[in-house]
Amino acid sequence: MLKMILLAGTMTIAAPALAQTMAPVDPGVQTAPQTTMVDPSTTAPQTAVDPATSTTAPATTAAPAQTAEAASAADGTQVASAVDTQFGTYDKNADGKLSQAEFSSWMVALKTASDPATKAGSAETKKWVGAAFAQADTDKNKSLDKAEVTGFLTKG
């Protein structure tokens, strides 16, 4: 559920970039032909010749691993960016830390963005926010700094 909330917040930030459209193509203007990319996971494995041993060995590709690492790094970067952008809005006393009440208002806002039926005063929401705060407060000092909030939201 927290991932959905995070996704909603990230999409809110990214919406202007996603809303951009390409210019319409004039039918009278000739454009270069488009090429088709081949999915390496659906093609037969290629072999490479090792000149030192004169044997063939299957070629390896690191693209899938790099893609997964890049996606998780992008998610972490997006979360950190969102936290940096919004932290000050919810840090009402500007002490650089969020109290449980400040954190609660932020989490309720995120949850309401993904589920408009969320009621801030309901017992279920209060229980959910309390559990989230306890999980995010890794040093157990009853307040959250940016690093704790970022770590919590990155884990989902």
Image (spheres, rainbow, N blue to C red):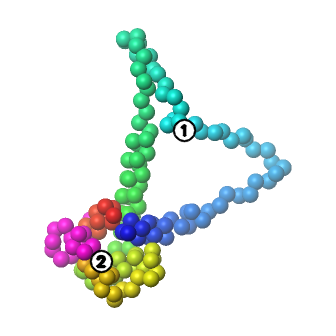
**Amino acid of disc 1:** Asp
> Is residue 30 toward the left or the right of residue 49 in the image?
right
> Is residue 50 toward the left or the right of residue 100 in the image?
right
Q: In percent of the image, x 49 and y 25: which residue is there? A: 46
Can I make out residue 13 in this image? no
Can I make out residue 122 in this image? yes
Q: Where does the image place residue 147, in percent across and percent down from the top left?
A: 26, 65
> Is residue 42 toward the left or the right of residue 155 in the image?
right
Q: Which residue is mark 1?
A: 39
Image-quadrant location for residue 62 = top left
**Amino acid of disc 2:** Trp
Label 2 residue SS:
helix
User: Which image quadrant: the C terminus?
Assistant: bottom left
145 inside magenta stretch: yes
Label 1 or label 2, whichever comes before in sequence order = 1
Number of numbered discs present?
A: 2
Q: In percent of the image, x 49 and y 37: which residue is there? A: 41
Decide: few, some or many residues near mark 1? Use Cα within 10 Å; few <14, some 14-19, many ≥20: few
> Is residue 87 toward the left or the right of residue 21 in the image?
left
Q: Which residue is mark 2?
A: 128
| Residue 125: mark | none
Q: CA distance from mark 1 to mark 2?
A: 43 Å
Segment tinted magenta in the rendering = 131-147
Q: Where does the image place residue 104, in percent across and percent down from the top left?
A: 31, 80
Q: Nearer the viewer, residue 77 or 121?
A: 121
